[in-house]
Image: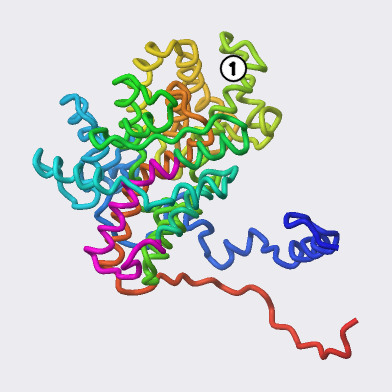
């Protein structure tokens, strides 16, 4: 009898139990062999695995005695402080994402003329092969936009007449094309999901050449294609802040590892998408929104004492998803503050006024103040803890009326700029495959002849 594709049979369950028993490595063995699990040492510092010029995170400073102390978080794109970059384009009342892509790819800020040419090139690339949407998205709709996005990226390999050439000009061309079409792939995948799985009307808009990436995202997503200038500017800001982050994050490291093998651009970016899809990496802002919704349905959110008690119960695994986490707080590197979160928080207030989300914004600010206190009281932590970008990006996306199914794909629409810069850097400078070492801790054992196995 034919079994369902997704069915876990009793045999599989039994063998899974066997696999679990036989593949368990005791935590103390990592300390015994001086292995830094997750490539983080006992103090939480990342183990250095490479060099980069793309971006840099600063969360500590050294005093005159050589001692390290936490400091307000700072993020640099190609040596330029992210706050200065953001202040620059906001002060000039212009969109910043395309300028940020240029900076990450070419390691310098564009002149007005250079930026105009670059934006035109991205606009010219913003189209998909004939019948691609029909054949790759509408004919095979899925329930997870990240999987569809990955599938589409791999499919674009077959439309490329020179897909395996890893010379810098060809890889740059491929990266710019992918950067240009990612908004279309993400939104069209969502429209397909809405139509075939949620029984909603199907509409497909074409991008407008005069629009920025942020404007086109809103135009493609909304049935009437309309948006306010503030909506577009806030989304553009979110894209800038998500575009790159220090090189050591999981998906960017994946890009380096896969690129070092000499494989094609489409395979490398698809691998990065698989990494970003993981809830430990790209899905935290969805959890933030769901957590705050649960809070509003459980307690009086005007009572700070009730909020404090709810957060404490969260850490005890008694609320929401019982994971023992307050989502949107803490970071592998930042301690005192995440500069991206600070910038989004400052801009979220104006959007909350336009959208009538003042009470929601007030709640987020209250939780941002109380949560670090609760975490410090209940957890033994080696460094400070603060709200991270996921905490406020979920609020931003909700105020923009963006569906939660697109939260992580929007992350990808932005982060592909950083992935592209790192892929080019890896190809240009490394020349060796990245091959980490694992220590075997399984004792040798004799081979048991066939006739003696019972």
Residue 100: quadrant of the picture: top left
Q: How is the image coloured?
A: rainbow
Q: Determine whether, in the image, residue 300 is placed left or right of residue 103.
A: right
Residue 373 percent coordinates (x, y): 52, 25
Q: Residue furthest front?
A: 131
In this view, the residue in front, 123 or 26, is 123
- Classify 10 Å Cα crowding around label 1: few (below 14), some (14-19), many (20 and above): many
Residue 59: quadrant of the picture: top left
Q: Does 19 appear above or below 412?
A: below
Q: Residue furthest right?
A: 454
- Residue at 59% in and 65% down: 32
Residue 42 seen in render: no
Q: Determine whether, in the image, residue 180 is placed left or right of residue 315.
A: left
Q: Determine whether, in the image, residue 360 is placed left or right of residue 265.
A: right
- Residue 180 in the magenta stretch? The answer is yes
Please give the count of numbered marks on the rendered protein: 1
The span shown in magenta is 157-186
Residue 58 percent coordinates (x, y): 31, 43
- Residue at 63% in and 25% down: 312
- Residue 135 in the magenta stretch? The answer is no
Q: Quadrant of the C terminus?
A: bottom right
């Amino acid at each position: 009898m034919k079994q369902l594709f997704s069915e876990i049979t009793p045999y599989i369950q039994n063998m899974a139990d066997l696999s679990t028993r036989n593949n368990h490595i005791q935590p103390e063995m990592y300390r015994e062999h001086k292995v830094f699990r997750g490539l983080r040492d006992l103090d939480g510092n990342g183990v250095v695995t490479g060099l980069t010029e793309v971006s840099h995170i600063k969360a500590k400073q050294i005093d005159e005695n050589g001692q390290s102390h936490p400091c307000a978080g700072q993020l640099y794109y190609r040596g330029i402080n992210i706050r200065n970059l953001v202040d620059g384009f906001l002060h000039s009342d212009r969109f910043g994402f395309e300028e940020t892509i240029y900076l990450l790819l070419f390691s310098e800020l564009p002149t007005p003329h250079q930026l105009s040419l670059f934006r035109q090139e991205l606009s010219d690339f913003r189209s998909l092969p004939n019948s691609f949407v029909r054949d790759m998205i509408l004919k095979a709709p899925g329930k997870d936009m990240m999987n569809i996005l990955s599938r589409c990226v791999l499919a674009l390999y077959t439309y490329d007449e020179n897909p395996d050439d890893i010379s810098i000009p060809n890889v740059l061309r491929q990266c710019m094309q992918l950067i240009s079409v990612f908004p279309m792939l993400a939104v069209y995948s969502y429209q397909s999901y809405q139509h075939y799985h949620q029984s909603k009307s199907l509409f497909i808009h074409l991008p407008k050449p005069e629009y920025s990436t942020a404007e086109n995202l809103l135009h493609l997503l909304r049935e009437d294609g309309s948006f306010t200038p503030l909506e577009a500017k806030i989304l553009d800001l979110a894209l800038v802040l998500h575009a790159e982050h220090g090189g050591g994050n999981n998906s960017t490291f994946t890009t380096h590892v896969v690129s070092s093998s000499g494989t094609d651009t489409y395979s490398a970016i698809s691998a990065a998408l698989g990494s970003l899809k993981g809830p430990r990496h790209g899905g935290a802002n969805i959890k933030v929104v769901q957590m705050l919704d649960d809070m509003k349905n459980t307690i009086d959110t005007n009572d700070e004492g009730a909020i404090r008690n709810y957060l404490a119960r969260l850490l005890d695994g008694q609320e929401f998803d019982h994971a023992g986490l307050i989502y949107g707080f803490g970071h592998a590197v930042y301690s005192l503050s995440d500069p991206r979160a600070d910038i989004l928080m400052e801009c979220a207030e104006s959007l909350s006024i336009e959208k009538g989300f003042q009470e929601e914004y007030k709640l987020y600010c209250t939780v941002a103040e109380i949560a670090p206190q609760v975490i410090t009281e209940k957890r033994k932590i080696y460094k400070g803890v603060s709200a991270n970008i996921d905490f406020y990006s979920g609020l931003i996306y909700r105020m923009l009326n963006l569906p939660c199914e697109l939260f992580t794909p929007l992350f990808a629409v932005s982060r592909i700029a950083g992935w592209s810069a790192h892929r080019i850097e890896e190809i240009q400078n490394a020349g060796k495959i990245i091959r980490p070492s694992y220590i075997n801790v399984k004792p040798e054992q004799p081979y048991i002849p066939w006739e003696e196995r019972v």
